[in-house]
Image (spheres, rainbow, N blue to C red):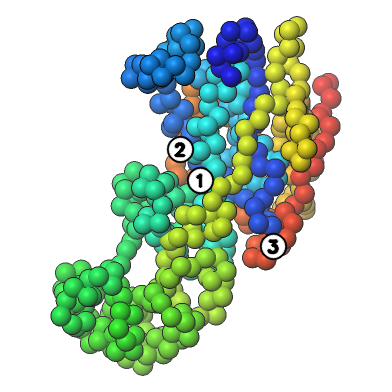
């Protein structure tokens, strides 16, 4: 596309691209924006070095004029977007990219590869932390995904309310609190469970978490308290009927005087399994596979579409697809979240080619992220985490249901405000 546009003289036409989802996956009621911070960092670094250009030339991917153009590529346009951690709905304009066609089209794959994965994880994580009802969740999915994706997933999960991660690289890069427990291999390494527990407590202290389901759970709990005392930090259950076992272990711990020892559960949890344990005496959840694979929706289904471009007269005109089942809505978008008198979201209101008419309690959703090629949207990770907390609290209660349903609020297009 770039090579043909350069040859045709259309590559420098002003263009507006939009990132959005046509629908939410699996009947979910809302999604959560993820990856914006990582994307901004990637855009700052995004260029074509000599090694890359040599490869493109040697393999004949593009011609010499295109190679010359790529050799000086730096994005110099503007980007607006929803803040990271913000809930979104079908057709929410999560990102607006305004620049020349050439500059913007080059960013498509970079943008979608980051935001589709991260938004899938934040959306799943949000449902899980909702189901956990303020009990802490630990991200433990590093062994179930690509090594780079593991770090991104830990970051995305933290934005949506997870309290910690087992991924030390994520802790190093993003300052996310790190937590973990021993595995069954550590118990099996030793000649007896007593020897394994003694080694762990002596090395890590009584505040450690003992994995108690390698052999017999009841015997392991009694053994753990015998070794560590009633100040044992926690026990972890990783198999079997977690609901029944949690009640039995809680009763046993209390009877032994270990009333402050916590119970952490793992074992292929997802939001539905977490919700099913709401009545159990569980103090925390470790979540892995389901989280890093989007709990059945490994991509957010985001697309990157041209919605406006400059014509031969230098005027911006709306453009849109007419494809069957994938129609577009042309024009540069402006979005607000309309809220009722109680501060609860009523609708996603989108203006085309201008801001929509203001309601009594509308909240603007698009913020500047890049201006004239300079990133202006960097923010601490905790800011995205707080935005998610506030944005989720603003949604109607139906949004938090685990069952399949329609989006929690409708998306409506309104005429833009007429200039004075």
Q: Is residue 120 left or right of residue 194?
A: right
Q: Which mark is first along the chain, 2 or 1?
A: 2
**Residue occupying image coordinates x 61% and y 44%:** 301
Element under label 2? helix
Residue that badge 1 annotates: 118
Q: Is residue 113 above or below residue 222?
A: above
Residue that badge 3 annotates: 404
Q: Is residue 187 left or right of residue 301?
A: left
Number of residues whose C-alpha sits closer than 10 Å to that of mark 2, classed few (under 14), some (14–19) or many (20 or more)? some
* Viewer-side residue, 315 vs 325: 325
**Residue occupying image coordinates x 80% and y 42%:** 412
The x, y position of residue 354, in whole percent, is: 76, 27
**Residue occupying image coordinates x 44% and y 31%:** 42
Q: Which mark is residue 57?
A: none
Q: Is residue 240 above or below residue 334?
A: below
Element under label 1? helix
Q: Is residue 355 visible?
A: no
Quick check: marks 1 and 2 in contact, CB under 8 Å? yes
Q: Which mark is first along the chain, 3 or 2?
A: 2
Quadrant assignment, res 411: top right
Quadrant assignment, res 322: top right
Question: Separation of disc 1 and disc 3 at Cα?
Answer: 22 Å
């Amino acid at each position: 596309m770039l090579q043909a546009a350069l040859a045709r003289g259309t590559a420098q036409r002003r263009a507006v691209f939009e990132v959005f989802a046509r629908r939410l996956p699996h009947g979910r009621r809302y999604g959560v924006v993820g990856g914006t911070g990582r994307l901004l960092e990637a855009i700052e670094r995004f260029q074509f070095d000599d090694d890359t250009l040599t490869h493109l030339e040697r393999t004949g991917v593009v011609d010499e004029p295109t190679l010359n153009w790529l050799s000086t590529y730096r994005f110099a346009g503007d980007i607006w977007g929803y803040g990271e951690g913000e809930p979104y709905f079908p057709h929410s304009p999560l990102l607006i990219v305004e620049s020349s066609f050439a500059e913007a089209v080059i960013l498509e794959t970079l943008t979608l590869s980051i935001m589709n994965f991260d938004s899938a994880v934040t959306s799943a994580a949000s449902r899980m932390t909702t189901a956990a009802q303020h009990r802490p969740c630990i991200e433990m999915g590093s062994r179930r995904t690509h090594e780079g994706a593991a770090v991104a997933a830990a970051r995305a999960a933290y934005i949506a309310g997870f309290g910690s991660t087992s991924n030390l690289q994520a802790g190093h890069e993003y300052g996310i609190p790190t937590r973990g427990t021993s595995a069954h291999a550590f118990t099996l390494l030793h000649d007896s469970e007593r020897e394994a527990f003694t080694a762990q407590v002596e090395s890590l202290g009584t505040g450690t978490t003992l994995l108690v389901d390698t052999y017999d759970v009841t015997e392991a709990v009694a053994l753990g308290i015998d070794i560590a005392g009633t100040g044992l930090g926690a026990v972890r259950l990783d198999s079997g009927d977690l609901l029944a076992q949690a009640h039995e272990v809680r009763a046993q711990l209390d009877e032994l005087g270990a009333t402050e020892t916590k119970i952490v559960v793992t074992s292929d949890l997802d939001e539905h399994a977490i919700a099913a344990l709401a009545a159990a005496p569980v103090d925390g959840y470790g979540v892995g596979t389901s989280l890093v694979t989007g709990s059945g929706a490994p991509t957010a289904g985001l697309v990157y579409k041209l919605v406006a471009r400059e014509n031969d007269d230098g005027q911006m005109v709306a453009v849109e697809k007419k494809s069957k089942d994938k129609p577009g809505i042309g024009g540069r978008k402006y979005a607000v979240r309309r809220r009722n008198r109680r501060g609860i979201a009523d609708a996603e209101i989108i203006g085309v080619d201008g801001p929509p008419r203001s309601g009594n309690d509308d909240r603007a959703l698009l913020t500047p992220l890049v201006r004239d090629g300079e990133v202006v949207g960097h923010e601490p990770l905790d800011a995205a985490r707080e935005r998610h907390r506030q944005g989720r609290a603003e949604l109607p209660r139906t949004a938090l249901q685990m069952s399949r349903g329609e989006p929690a609020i409708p998306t409506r297009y309104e005429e833009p405000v007429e200039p004075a």
